[in-house]
Image (spheres, rainbow, N blue to C red):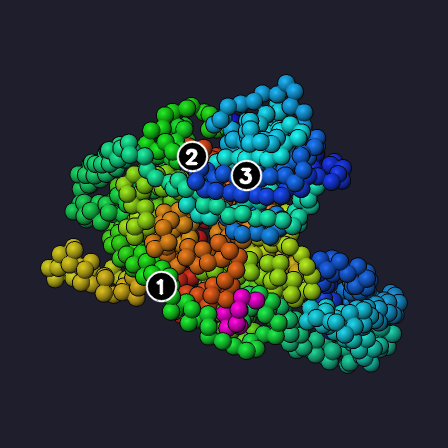
Amino acid sequence: MRRGISLIAVMPLIVALLAMPVVQATAVSKVEASGESSSYRNVNLTWELASPAEDGDGFHIIFSESSFSHTGNATIHSTVFTASTDGMAQPAVGEWYDDCQSSSGDDDWAMVFRSENGSAVVPPGTVAIRCDLTGMPVGAEVFLAILPFDSHWISGDLSEVVGATSTAADELPPSADTRPVWFAIGSIALSLVVLLAVLGWKERSAQGRSAMLYVAPALMALALLTFYPVGYGIVLSFTDANQSALGEQSFNGLDNYVEVFTSAGFLRVLGFTLLWTVVNVFAHVGIGLALAMALQGRVKGKVAYRTILLLPWAIPSYITVLIWRGIFQYDGLFNGLLGTQIDILGLPVPAAAAVIVVNIWLGFPFMMMTISGALQTIPGDIYEAAEVDGVSPISQFRHLTLPMLKPTIVPVALLGFIWTFNMFNVIYLMTDGGPNLWFGEPGSTDILITYVYDVAFRRGMYGLAAAWSVVIFLILLWFSATYMKKTNATEAVV
Amino acid sequence: MSDLAIRWFAPLELRILSGMSFLSCALLSVVLLFDYFRGDYDSMAIHGVGMMALMVMILTGIDFTEEGRTRRRDMGLTASGITLACGVIGLAIRGAEYLLVDLWAGLVLLIPGLSGLYLLSTPLVSRWVESTIERAEAEDGLVRNRQLLPKWQAALKHVVLLHVVAVVMIPVLWIIDVAISPGDALQGGAMFSSPTGEHFSNILGGDNFWVWARNSVIVSIGTTLLGLCLAIPAGYAFSRYRFKGRGAMMFTFLLVQMFPGIIILVPYFMVMKSLGLLNTAIGLILAYSVTALPLCVWMLKGFFDTVPKELEEAALLDGCSQFGVFYRIILPLSLPAVAVTGLFSFLVAWNEFLLALTFNTSDDMFTLPVGLASYISATDSAWGDFAAMSLLVAIPVVLLFIVFQKFLIEGLTAGSVKG
């Protein structure tokens, strides 16, 4: 837990934020950033204060990959407090992901102090602070700003946003050795050939032998490009592989798993993932069922309706998600139609509602079409019989339609569950997990897989990300097994 | 007999009113949500009262017991009046500044309000309420109910469907509007006023679009070819031959489809990195053809199953080799099916985002999805160019999908559901 801010560290911060009396905090007078810093993925940020800092002042360092005018879509990288530094440790350069130094004038820079929970603390009287921030996006321009404590947290306007480009790009260290990979690929291919040869040799008929030849290419591809990576991922999850030490990783036991389960955001991101998945699947099945029923029988303009209702499925999802992002912008269509001024994607609850609505919009046509197909196989005469017997439409639905649809809905709902659980595009393209992104932690709308993406490709911690992936896989496996047992869906699937 | 007809008969008007009010209630909950967003608590109170009145109207229409019919009718009439009044007041509050959504909210209340007043005061309903209905009239009424009911149900269906159609079409129309409007304005104002082709000429005149489109075409066609080469023999073997391990292998193909992509993503990335396949087309082609493989195998197996086995047996008797049968008879016969499967893997590759984002990070190797996303995510602006480009990308895909929807959906559901 050296990297990232632990929950214990964040809680007092949040409390402090909420309980902060309205004091006139020291204003920031000048901010400078440069990407030409000493090391990998780093950006340097220096800011000067209009007057010497007083006890209780504090500053958030926030950054974003897009230029921003308010804090809604920014990530808090770290926080610097002003307080008495008596008895606090003063760690050396390189021990923290935000190496900060402070100056109380005359260019005499000293390392910041660290409180017990790891927050950076500078003494009162400080007039300038500079930080070396790690973990910045690679090779792209990042925008940084300083947010004093008394500014409004979500919609606080920023006086000055500066841009910088981190210098070091992801590059494979020269020592990386491709031999283990080729060895693994070769041995898998060889053992598969042997297995098929043995199976074919045991086979009596010529047919069976040629069948082995026919399935071999597909099986080979599956083994090399699916099963091998899965196995490799499991191995990886027990190592400390990361961006700067690729190919030189060493085993570190269960450390990654410990970090996954003790990380600050684990329960929160799991909770939101479940909420996201359950709401979506219920809405997909419910709306799909309702529309399939509405389109059943003779309806004028049925073909036109079906074609239009298929559009959310037919249009590539990355396009529609970006369109919806435009609609939910501050100056977008939603606010325009309603005459409101809500920063939907910048507030936690509206942003969560928005991503869920968009995914419901995307997913219902699939359910509609599958249920529609199943409805067509129900013979019409049982309804006639029911009508003669005076069964009300509601009872017909409950006791005839639903049981007949069950063999279709049960496996499709499971499929929908897995798909929604892994729906990366919507969250990544709409909010990128924000708002309230703290460095190294999931944001308000992060689901497990968008967070794993962040861990792997923003923070560059491959081993940790692999451990998260294994945990996700186990959750899905456990859920699917329980679901199938509970619904006896196995015979419908296989 | 006479009693029976009278006892069974209840005017259809009541059920219509009930259904209509139910629908309005559901729509009104959305209206209330919008009021809340706007912080317009006066309208919210008015609409809340309207919603309660609508609930009374729902109840009026589903209780047919003889006692208290008059009282229920009167309650229904009062509720209709209140609903109507709420609709009018709601519109009046907004005054001249009303928006489209206010008009819609008003109609949601006005239509059931007016219909309630009319339907509950027709002569037939009055006589039924007062229990002075004649036997012949009741019998006629039963016939009439039976004839009219489907029409009314259809009308309500259309209202529901039209609302869904509106929700589906709003983003589509909006993006067309943004694409042909000058500048990057998002709200647009009047739709489709002052159309311009500037964004389209920006996109078609620039280099990015053509580079990304070329990458996408290479990757998608490569995926289709490689995927088919792998899937056709396997699908054929599963369809025609019985051999050891067949069940286990087929189950494996089904299982892989359920694998979450994320568990593969990180190790995939590292393997591709080690082999130097990042920022190449080959890396993506390999990854995509395996992603689509299980479903393609299952789709093709289903199609091959429909080719009669007798044809092959005849050919074998005539001295054709095993491979000759497959190549000369089965393949030509199932060419349409192979084409649909190919289209499916083409679409998978054309639309994939996550792997393309992870593997190809330099912008001259972007595929269209990643390139398109980079237009927006960098600056949150350039909406006009983005809109034009998404239309150029989406229209061919949507047309293909709609033309071949029947086959695609059949194949897809065959693979995913029936197994």
Q: How far apart are labels 1 and 3 at the CA level?
A: 38 Å
Which image quadrant for residue A442? Answer: top right
Q: Does residue B306 show up?
A: no
Instruction: Name the N-terminal-most of marks 2 and 3.
Output: 2
Q: Which residue of the protein is positioned furthest toward the front in this rendering?
A: A106
Does the magenta segment cover residue A402?
no
User: In the shown orientation, is residue A145 left or right of residue B344?
Assistant: right
Query: Is label 1 in a helix, a strand or a loop?
Result: loop
Pointer 2 local density, CA inside 10 Å: few below 14, some 14–19, many at least 20:
few
Q: Position of residue A130 (x, y in %)?
A: 54, 35
Residue density around tag 1, few if under 14, some if 14–19, many if 20 or more, within 10 Å: few
Q: Residue at x 64, y 27 (%)?
A: A123
Indicate yes or no whether the magenta region holds residue B184.
Answer: yes
Q: Is residue B70 left or right of residue B229?
A: right
Assign a secondary structure to mark 2.
loop
Q: Are marks 2 and 3 on the same chain?
A: yes
Q: Which residues are magenta?
A: B179-185
Query: Could you tell me which secondary element the residue under label 3 belongs to?
Result: strand
Chain letter of mark 3 equals A
| Disc sitting over residue B207 in the figure | 1
Q: Main secondary structure of the magenta part?
A: loop
Under mark 3, the amino acid is: Thr
Q: What residue do we see at 73% from left, 60% from top?
A: B38
Q: Which residue is mark 2?
A: A38
Q: B11 above or below A43?
A: below
- List the residue tagged with mark 3: A46
Above or below, A205 against A121 in this view is below
Residue B268: x and y in percent read 35, 41
Q: From the image, state whether disc 2 or disc 1 is nearer to you.
A: 2
